[in-house]
Structures are given as C-alpha cells and as structure tokens.
Amino acid sequence: MAADAAAQPASARRPITATERRVLWSVAATIGIVVLFTAIGSLERRLATDVEHGARFVWNASETSARLLTVAHTIVATLFLLTSRRLRTPRAAALLAGLALLSVGLCLGFATLLEVAAPLAAALFYAYFLVHEMRDEASLWRATEESGPPGTGALPPRWAAGPLALLFALAVAGAFAVGATVGTGRATRYAPFLADASPTARAAATLGLLSALGLLARLVLRRLARSDPGGLRGALSRVRPLAVVYAVGYLVLLVGMALTGRLYGIVVLHVCVWYGFVARRLASDEREGRGPDPRPRVASWAWFRTTAAGFHALHLGVVFGLIAVAAAWALGSGNDADVPIVPLLVSRTAFPFWTITHVTLSWFPRGA
C-alpha cells in the first residue's frame, strides 16, 4: 500500500515532452540569433557611422534574422517538397502547380493592397502567417505522437488543435486590440481610424473588444471541458505540449511586437522549431535503423535530404550563403535596388513575398 501510494504521485507527474523541449530549445536559439545580429548591427554602426540606416546590412536585428532565415527555410522546404514521393503522380503535380499559381496571385494582391492600404495588407499578411504557424505546430506535435504519459503509444486527439489554435488567435486579437485602441505600442498602426479618438472612446472600444473576445474564449474552454472525462483540467493535461507551444509562441509574439512593432520574433521561432524537428527526426531514424540503406554518398542529394548531417549542411549552407550575399550587397552597394537578382533574394521588400509563397505551398497535403 505504501509503495503504491508513493508511486502514484510519481506516475502522475508528466515529464517534459519532446515537443516542449523542442520549443524551449527554439526559444533559446531565437534569442541567440537575434542577439548575434544585434551585435553585428552594433559593430556595423560603430565602424560605418556615415552609412544611412537603410543601406546597412543589419537594418533591424530581428527583421534581418527573420528575413534571411525565412528565405533559407523557403528554399530548403521547397526543395524537399519538389523531391518528395508525394509528387510522383500527375494529380499531385497539378495540385502543386495550382498552389504555385495561387501564390503568384496572392503576392500580386498583397502588392496592390500594400499601395492603397498598407496597415490592412500588413494585418492580413501576419494573419496568413499565423494560420500557417498554428497549423505547422499542431502537425509537428502529432508527428511526435505525444498525448498522455510518454510510452502510452496514444496519438494526440485530433480535436485538440482547433480549440487551442482558436484560443491563440483570440489572445493575439486581444493583444492587438489593446495596443491599437489604447494607443500604446506600435499596434496603433493597424487601427488608424482611432488615431484622433478621445481617451474615453478608446477605452470603450478596448473594453468592448476584450469582452467579445473573452466571451468567445469562454465558449472554447467550455467546449474543451466537455471533450474530456476529466473536464477542462483533463483536456489541458492531454494537450499540454501543444498548449505550451502556443503559449510560448504568444509570449514571443508579444515581446517582438513590443520591441519592433512586427512579428519578426515568432517568424524566427517558427523556422527554428521546424529545423529542430526535421534534424531530430532524421537523427532518430538513423539511430533506430530507419535511415537509408546503403548510406548515401556524402554531398549527394539523398545525403542532404535523408541524413541529419546532410540536412544540417544544406540548411546552414543556404543560411550562410544568403548572409554572405546580403552582407556583400549592403557593404558593396548600400543595398542598391538596381543590382540584378540580389534584391529579389534578400531585400526587405522581398521578404513578405517569400513568406506568402512558402505558406501557400505548405497547403500541399502532408505525407510520405
């Protein structure tokens, strides 16, 4: 009896999961990357005091890191998709072509909207990315096969991702509502119609929006509570890893918004999470004998795509290659837009179009 009583609390304690470790590692990597680019930018300003802000390599540490990592992420992810077994049928190839055409249309639409209503274009862009981020996090969580205590072999419940994603979206909307209506922080750019409103009108708008968002959040929590025999506590316990991921992403989003007025931080976090997942999955496959047999030749495409060492070499090689191109462009010509090709690859204006293209292609069905 005593032994059973002692064992019960231990079994109830759920250790940190692979998903939680991955997101914590990714937060540390995000901070490290931004700090590194901050140091580079500080050194650049000290050595070149006469260079204009827009002509520098590091325009903004979080923006520069997000831009270069996103372009590298898009290149690698697209290469993986184009060489996937999923594309071996005419139907799959036609679907990918359709998504590519859709991405072109969305990019053209974004460019047009940017000229006539820049705040709305920015808000829609960030919303589109956040949908992608939430979907990806849920997909990676399920791919890690986590629910309940480790070792149970149970897959995560499919109902979980939707309510948690909705709660995340409501929390984001609440943060933007406070920033835009109260008039503090850079979120005010997304509600220019309140620029001349009185403090009373701002307060009323804030309370109204937060009340509506709070009511929706309560309905979602009630739905979660009814979905598990253990009520809300039981439901949240089952989906804890994904809840932690969304909570951490939300904190990163708030910090990034407070410091820069944009969502650069969560973009970097997104890339780091994906990088950590793929690298860990490939390393695990090799350790457990699920890797390619025979082992591919070093520097072959199969080596880049199916081994952890190859994946690190490919992704980091693309990242450092883009950094070298961007640095040479800034130092050599002051980010001159008339330089051929380079602005399309690493410029600040090209960054959202790379992101839109990547997100649109990511709707291609996932699988082997």
Image (cartoon, rainbow, N blue to C red):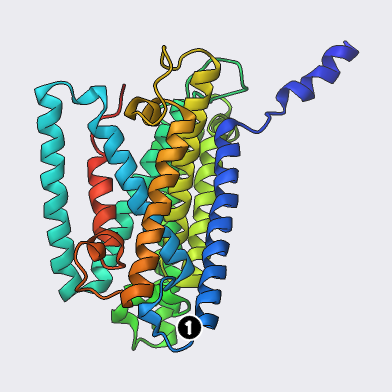
Image quadrant where one finds the C terminus = top left
Q: Is residue 27 left or right of residue 159?
A: right
Q: Amino acid at mark 1?
A: Ala
Position in image of residue 125 (x %, y %): 28, 59
Who is closer to the viewer here, 114 or 291? 291
Who is closer to the viewer here, 94 or 46? 46
Residue at screen point 39% across, 85% down: 52
Who is closer to the viewer here, 199 or 356? 356
Image quadrant where one finds the N terminus = top right
Q: Is residue 329 left or right of residue 59?
A: left
Residue at screen point 21% across, 70% down: 339
- Residue 229, quarter of the rendered image: top right
Position in image of residue 9 (x %, y %): 78, 25
**Placement of 199 over or under 26, stated as above or below:** below
Position in image of residue 215 (x %, y %): 43, 53
Q: Is residue 33 left or right of residue 163?
A: right
Q: How many numbered marks does the figure carry? A: 1
Residue at screen point 16% across, 68% down: 113
Q: Which residue is mark 1?
A: 48
Position in image of residue 147 (x %, y %): 54, 25
Residue 214 visible in the shown view:
no
